[in-house]
Image (cartoon, rainbow, N blue to C red):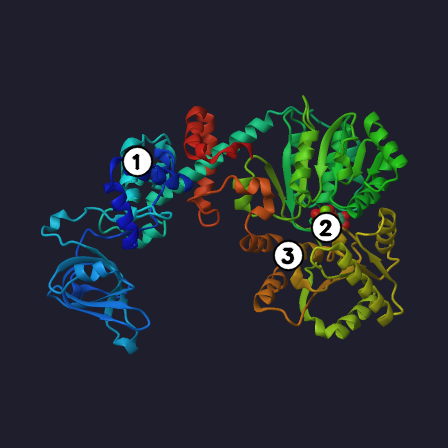
Amino acid sequence: MPEAQRNTAKSGVRSDSAGKTRDRVTIAERVAKMGLIKDWDFVLHLPLRYEDETRITPVAGLRASDWAQIQATVVSSVTRAGKFFQLVLGVSDGTGTLEVRYLHFKPGLKERLKTGTLHRFYGQVQQQPVQYGGRLQMLHPRVKEPIEDASNLPSTLTPVYPAGEHITQTWLRKRIDRALLDVDLTDIVPADFTRPLGLPRLSDALKRLHHPLPGADFDAYSERRTPEWKRLKFDELLAQQIALREARNRKKSLRAPALTGRPGGFKAKLLAALPFELTKAQKRVLGEIDADLGAESRMNRHVQGDVGCGKTIVAEVSALQAVDSGFQAALMAPTEILAEQHYEKLKPLLEPLGVQTVLLTGSLKARDKAAVQELAASGAAQVVIGTHALIQDAVKFHKLGLAIVDEQHRFGVSQRLKLREAMTGDEVPHLLMLSATPIPRTLAMSYLADIDVSVIDELPPGRTPVVTTLVNMERMDEVVAAVDRAVKAGSQVYWVCPLIEESDKADLTAAVMRRDALVKALPQCKIDIVHGAMSADEKQTVMSRFAAGGCDILVATTVIEVGVDVPNASVMIIEHAERFGLSQLHQLRGRVGRGGKKSFCLLLYSPALSEAGRERLSVIRASTDGFAIAREDLRLRGPGEFMGARQSGAPMLRFADLEADIALLDAARNAAQQWLAQDPAQALKHAGRWFAGAGGFLQA
Ligand code: ADP
Ligand code: MG
């Protein structure tokens, strides 16, 4: 701590009583800004590191990079003007001499450290660069007055706390020590949970974290590896798990109709008519959904699975379970193209069974829209597929039993909230969310503990991994030649145009220019274009033609990013791949590799690609595992992107680290479950202790 600060603090305390009050108030305000208000906040304000003032090290015993305290006499003192105005001392304790150096010092300091005076210096020992002599030195050590009697040294390590501006360590230490005495540190976490993990009791852990014993492993404390740290992390995770579980229980208490299905009903018929066998993972997830739907408490389940694992069919089968039970099902998709595709694929499967299926999108003509809304309202339409037009005010369902949201992460936070609001009442529909943006397990466990998660962790058989290549855009001619060969060999090609500053218009121009260039270069190929500015009808015509094989190359903007399923397409070209996010690239690549054909993805990059940009693209080239890519994306972008703004800020962890403390998280999760079952009042008290200050944590 700079001397200047210490002096202001001291003089503030020393001043007359009015000044004193004023000073106190400002300190309280300053620490409140750091979230330090109640005693418990101070108790949990843990040191950044520690200083060992418990012993005095002989100068001869110092080693470079040690933090140490010496007691020595000033034997030489010179000031030097140079790049810095500096005070250079030689200090000696009889075992050796050390150089001590202050840059930009106050005049008083030189006076205080006169030759012949004895002091204690605390600081880090450094080795000078060789050209300056290579000797050991201390730069800016803290000075204290000497101690006659070594038994007067502190008996524990001195904590160094995170401190804001004008908050001194001395003030914080006193305030925290008082809080440690005042606060009730009774351990309410049953020892049955902590003992098997080798964790100390809470009061011991807290006291030791603030004041470790001499000889304690400095590094282990600073790196938060000691059992005391683990205990705090565990308590924090435990509180989080209890809070989230409790929130989930409350949501579970929402009543929904029990959709038990019907033997030999539509669902059974659809399953029998499928041209393929469901994968083990798909069957397992269907079983989980089946059990949830059959209960009278509202299902809130996320189905996660990598691109192409076959989530859609799982959702469709579940929809029929609702229909079999006499209810309607709604399927909401983030884009018109995707909604259309679902409709086009489902209708031929369902109509023959006698299930009426309708499509509702924003671009329907008013009259058609009204007709579809009427079908939904009367209950005549049993399966309603659409875009977010489904949650617009005019839409009323007769008896909605199941609401499915495909690619749920693509919906904005406000749309998701609207969906929830639209569905509250005495009885609400069950909710099924599908997402191909895999949420890492740790994140799912802690942030989504109020939601059930099913994972389809298996791809349908016969898929071969997509071969991904990075290609410099300067080699465009070769790329076009390769596309030509692929088309001649019977493949269909997606050509995704660059993302331009999130502006649809500019994206469109780029796409049109690319289409024109390709038409010129490959006159024998059938080339279409699809982009966001087209009407739903136009998009639909183009997509159907492509799906039916009537077009070889589909030039597209990112409108095809999610969900589009044309198994015969086996080449994906992405221009200016460096402008896309990792998950987005993974999604786009997932449009190919869906049939039996060997598939390719070419990531075209600008010649000006930076080293970091190349590294990012290499992640996509090296991995076809959506989970690994999502983890990398998470590392680069932080969790907020995954969860949407609302959830992201709330359940922040101060001590535990989701990736590093996964074992503790598992233990905390189990303990939370047991504790809530055995003694909910105490469990909730624990959660309250940790999160009372964190505001609407439970409402998230
Ligand atoms: P996603 O999980 O990305 O939404 P889709 O549901 O679009 O994946 O499925 C991808 C493709 O795999 C579709 O063409 C679908 O018909 C097919 N498919 C789904 N399940 C199976 C299966 N068990 N066996 C073979 N093909 C399957
Ligand atoms: Mg899908």
Q: Name the amino acid type tagged 3.
A: Gly
Q: Please state the horizontal and vertical placement of residue 342, each as a whole percent of the image.
A: 79, 43
Q: Is residue 52 left or right of residue 277?
A: left
User: Considering only order in the chain, which callout, 1 or 2, is on the residue closer to the N terminus?
Assistant: 1
Q: Quadrant of residue 321?
A: top right
Q: Is residue 612 left or right of residue 77?
A: right
Q: Tell me what residue is drawn at x 81 percent, y 52 percent.
A: 533
Q: Tell me what residue is drawn at x 87 percent, y 47 percent.
A: 537
Q: Residues within 10 Å of mark 2 (few under 14, many from 20)?
A: many
Q: Please state the horizontal and vertical placement of residue 141, each as a whole percent of the image.
A: 25, 59
Q: Is residue 370 left or right of residue 415?
A: right
User: Considering only order in the chain, which callout, 2 or 3, is on the residue closer to the N terminus?
Assistant: 2
Mark number displayed over residue 581: 3
Q: Give me the C-alpha separation between circle 2 and circle 1.
A: 62 Å
Q: Nearer the viewer, mark 2 or mark 1?
A: 1
**Residue situated furthest top in the rendering:** 426
Q: Residues within 10 Å of mark 3 (few under 14, many from 20)?
A: some
According to the picture, the residue beneath numbered tag 2 turns out to be 562
Label 2 element class = loop
Label 1 element class = helix
In the rendered image of this protein, does residue 177 appear above or below residue 159?
above
Q: Tell me what residue is drawn at x 33 percent, y 46 percent.
A: 167
Depth check: give the residue in front, 2 or 135: 2
Q: Name the amino acid type tagged 2.
A: Val
Q: Name the amino acid type tagged 1.
A: Thr
Label 2 residue near ligand 2, CB within 8 Å = yes
Q: Quadrant of residue 114?
A: bottom left
According to the picture, the residue beneath numbered tag 1 turns out to be 21
